[in-house]
Amino acid sequence: MLWSDAAAPVQRRLMRDGLVSFLHLLRRLLARRGAALSLAFLALVALVAAIADFLPLDPLTQSVADALMPPSAESWFGTDELGRDILARVVYGARTSLVTALGAVCIAALVGVPIGLVAGFYGDWRDSLLMRCIDVLLALPNILFAMALIAVLGRSQGAALIAVGIAGIPGFARIARAQVMARRQLDFVMAVRSFGGGPGYIMFRTLLPNIMSPLVVQAIVLASIAILLEAALAFLGVGVPPPTPSWGEMLRTGKSYLYEAPSYAVLPGLVLTLTILSLDTIGRALTALLDHDEAATPGETAGDRR
Amino acid sequence: MTTLSRRHFCMTGLALAAAAPLAAALPAAAQQLKGGTLRVAVLSELANYDPQQLSTVNFHVIKNLYDSLIEYTPEGKPEPSLATEWAIAPDKSSVTLKLRDGVTFHSGTPFKADSVLATLQKGADPKRGKNVFSTMSVVKDWSAPDERTVTINFKAPVPDRQILDLLQFLIPIDPKGIDTVETVPAGTGPYTLVNRAVGQSLTLKANPKYWREKQPIAQDLVFTVFSEDAAATAALESGAVDIVYNGSSRSAVRLKAAGYQVFAGPGQLVQVFRINSTRGPFRNKSFRQAFNYLMDRAAILRVGYAGMGQVVALPWAPASPAFDAAYTKTYAFDPDKAKKLIAASGLSADEVKGWKLLVNGSDEPSVAISQILQGSLAKAGIPIELDMRQGAEYVTALLGGDFAATFGAVGNVQKFPSRVATNSIYRTSQNPVLKDPHPHPDYVAAIARVDGAAGGEAEVKATYDNLNRVLVDEAFAIATNSYDVGLIVASQKIGGVTLDIDNLFVARTIGFK
């Protein structure tokens, strides 16, 4: 019998346990009022961003005669300096922000997690080499690094996404490495190893599912950082180019009209703040739940939970 | 007790009545304004102290550290300054200046003919002449018969207005400091340099040997550099500064409504849609001409400049002798006419949209008006993208001609019409955008005709009309609106503001009420 055949039931059990754990975690998360409200708000933002094309909203059509109108029944958030509907631009701006956040999290996770897995699993020169590279990335302020990258790649949503994603790599790498180092000598890993599991199998099929919880928390934290960073880049004038709606770009332009049309900057700013606040609330709640679990079951690993 | 006779009383009354207009004609500063420390907020750090580099970032210092040979009133009337007299030869091939006596540079060097010669030499040097160089193209040579007289000879007869513009543009520099003028000011101006904290502030103090009587009024002049217009206006409203110079039109409109004084000089800029007619669809004249009708000038003026300025279809401010309001009506926003011209161009749908609009991302009005044009083009069936670049990156592309089309303001639009050729897109030779040979020979010829029109008023007017006609026909630069640069917004306690023909900041007459 091949070692992988012998390990398959163990893996299936681990995956099933992981799904059960996730649903259990979600239920406990929803039991917290703040986290539930945050989830609901984020779901609403994500939903309107996803179905924006089917809503009666046009973020691009100009009507200079109707510029800088205050909120009204026709235009709930008012209009901008070119007479465009601010609500429409907020909705489409959510799409820009969420796509950037999602893409950045994917890039950071896809690069950072394998780096952390390899560094933590081997712990030898590979650890030293990879973590020094991560240290170099960490030494660069995110915003400066992102601006430098955009200067090279040009101003576009893709460039912003890549810049924010690369800035998030160190977070994933360090968390993955720390988690792997704490688990690599535990019994369930030794069991897979004794069945003949190779390093790749152990890292990606055995250890990775067991460190998903802190990585999910990190993904949520990075999503909020990514949205904020994308808005900051747009605010500094190096984000997504107009006329593509972007929350940061709206803040940047809106600040010039604070006296004439305060709602122009305030309302997109409020949506941005609530989005960041929601992600942070969920991240904090998840951390608290996971910390509570670890405190309640000392010596037990995520994979050992029954 | 002394009593006045009726005759004596009447004579005294008449004398007072006669003196009243004279008193009123004197600068308000001399009458009632007090000195002190004048605090001015500016929105850009100066590039250097060279008065021949007449760029906007240097506007707040030039007329405070230097004096020009002659000055213009805001209405364009020439007045003596360092030159007390000027005599244009009957054949208009030379001008002779008499220089003011008793003037010294800040270093203590007496102002004499040698400084004017050194200044002319610098201006005629392509490497050192900066903005003055192009205006020196009409000058053949110069001489100084004595210490107080300078004669400038021209290559050909030159119109009076062009000669006066040259004299107004020439700012004598101390010969001892002419090689280091970029870092150390070397003028005769009303203020001398005390201290400069780069990126933060510039402090000047009154020149005790200044030649204009009772000027400057304020003993100290402190410029504080603000990076944000909102921060500068907040400083004015909080009383931290007395004046905001060169702030945005939008802030000026708001502050005027709040009771602040707003002064706009005659030296407006004109926003111009610059077309690189050596690239892509812009080689096609009919396609370029469509842009005459694609500019929603009213929207551009309103959104970009808070309505302060005037819509124009030619690169002249209303104060220019070549200004012609009829063109604004003829070339009003008309997408249908634009579509017809685009159709007449014979270009395919793919050909007309294969370009990007370069945008100065650091300039909010440029971002807004570029989006307005983008919207107009979309309506005309030409979807384009904006190529946003910041600061130096944009300037490099603009001056290097590395663009298909972009908005960029031009200056000197209130002076002699051929001065427009000092702006990069309008240069007749060594044009950094259109290159040599110039792709629009009719335009080059029209400028040459303007320069050569030294005859009567009708002849001069005919050359202006010809130039205007050629400009809209060749359509490599589409003017959209004039707007104010160097706006002065002052608190109510400030008086004596003098407007400069180029909108430079003149502090010497400003004091506190």
Image (cartoon, coloured by chain):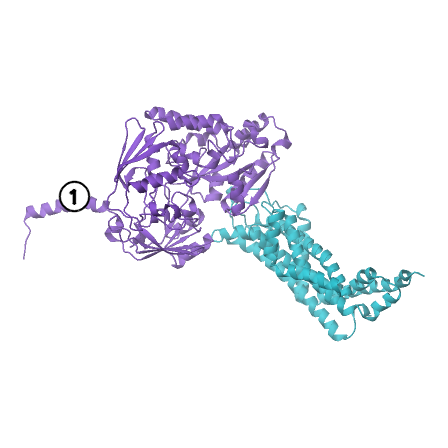
Chain colours: A cyan, B purple
Q: Give residue A64's position: percent from left, percent from top.
A: 52, 42
Q: Give residue B414's position: percent from left, percent from top.
A: 38, 37
Judging by the rendered image, the residue that carries numbered circle 1 is: B18
Q: Give residue A262's position: percent from left, percent from top.
A: 51, 54
**Depth check: B45 or B98 in front?**
B98
**Depth check: A48 or A148 in front?**
A148
Please tell me how crowded label 1 is: few (under 14), some (14-19), or many (20+) other residues with Cα within 10 Å.
few
- A100 left or right, relative to B153: right
Where, by quadrant of the figure, is residue A138 drawn?
A: bottom right
Q: Is residue B57 visible?
A: yes
Q: Is residue A271 visible?
A: no
Subunit bearing disc 1? B
Which image quarter holds the C terminus of chain A? bottom right
- A267 left or right, relative to A36: left
Q: Is residue A128 above or below residue B312?
A: below
Three-letter amino acid code at disc 1?
A: Ala
Looking at the image, which residue is at 27% across and 56% down?
Answer: B34
